[in-house]
Amino acid sequence: MKPMLSAENVVKVFGVPNSPHAITALSDVSIDVFSGETVGLVGESGSGKTTISRIMMGIETATKGVVLRDGRRVETKADWKELRRNIQYVFQDPYTALCPTMRVGAALAEPLIVHKKCPRSECSDRVAEMLKKVGLHPDVMRRLPIHLSGGQRQRVSLARALMLEPNVLICDEIVSGLDVSIQAQVLQLLINLQSELGISIVFISHDLRVVRYMCDRVYVMYNGEVIEAGETSNVFNTPSHQYTKSLLAAIPGVVRNSSVDIG
Ligand SMILES: Nc1ncnc2c1ncn2[C@@H]1O[C@H](COP(=O)(O)OP(=O)(O)OP(=O)(O)O)[C@@H](O)[C@H]1O
Ligand SMILES: [Mg+2]
């Protein structure tokens, strides 16, 4: 089976390569995402998790290496446009991800209108349907982001990302700004949405307990490289790299207790 989305041997240098100010964010990173799975990206701050995910959805270009969709290289402008429509990104911070002056209904209808997904007259029904799917009352449509709690905002961000029925959802630290009980609700929502919609999820998080709970496979990144990858249970139970061991050792209970659960 071919991965539905891959990054192959991606290098990313910010700034002019070989200049004193150049930053090599990714050295040689390869990541596969298969249909319907949740793939975790973990690693310390600055290890390149956001950069590789931005490259995989075409909002950042690779210095070297390629992105493949269903085994086919994404090359032309039309390929990238198609990719961007099928891969949606949910940001860490729902406070800045949503336009503060745009009511929730308009924010959710916007992707439908831009991509001509349905007649304007049907947008409102589609928005109401999606709000219910993410556990919000359709009346939320009339509110501004400032009138929502952090958990509600993150649900709205998820709803917005799902409006175009993407194949892959990239979730970049989506629960790290939320308190623990709300985190558990949003994660459960994500699991439910995945089984309902059959989407693949790239789940980026610092929190290894959450990654263990959510992900089928995991990539451990360090300093712009993937240093370990595999099924989550294998990586967590028998980490082979010293860095992974130290990441796991920093979380009380995770190494000793393989049934650790969240919240
Ligand atoms: N636009 C940019 N210009 C220059 N350097 C950048 C840019 N974006 C990222 N970097 C650098 O690339 C490296 C990887 O950053 P990235 O944001 O991918 O890390 P991350 O793993 O997502 O970190 P965090 O967990 O803090 O979100 C860092 O050294 C960062 O400073
Ligand atoms: Mg990041």
Image (spheres, rainbow, N blue to C red):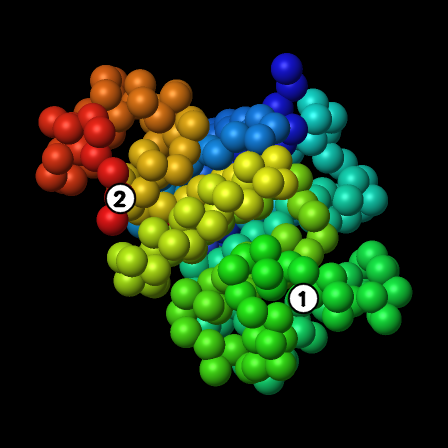
Where in the figure is residue 15, as x and y percent of width and height?
51, 53
Q: Earlier in the sequence, mark 2 or mark 1?
A: 1
Please provide percent x and percent y for residue 113.
Answer: 80, 66
How many labels sit on residues? 2
User: Which kind of residue does numbered mark 2 sit on?
Assistant: Ile
State the residue in front, 145 or 66. 145
- Disc number for residue 128: 1
Disc 2 marks which residue? 262
Q: Residue at x 23, y 18 (%)?
A: 238
The residue drawn where x is 50% and y is 43% is 192
In the image, 26 versus 71, the foreground residue is 71
Residue 55 is situated, as x and y percent measured from the top left of the image, at 58, 44
Label 2 and label 1: CA atoms lie apart by: 31 Å
Query: Hey, what amino acid is under mark 1?
Result: Ala
Q: Looking at the image, can residue 21 be seen? A: no
The answer to whether one can see residue 75 in this image is yes
* Quadrant of the image containing the N terminus: top right
Q: Residue at x 42, y 54 (%)?
A: 186
Secondary structure type for disc 1: helix
Please name whichever residue, 30 or 132, is drawn nearer the observer in this view of the structure.
Answer: 132
Mark 2, other Cα within 10 Å: few <14 / some 14–19 / many ≥20: some
At mark 2, the secondary structure is loop
Q: Is residue 176 left or right of residue 116?
A: left
Q: Are marks 2 and 1 in contact (CB under 8 Å)?
A: no
- What residue sits 57% from the left and 81% below the top? 143
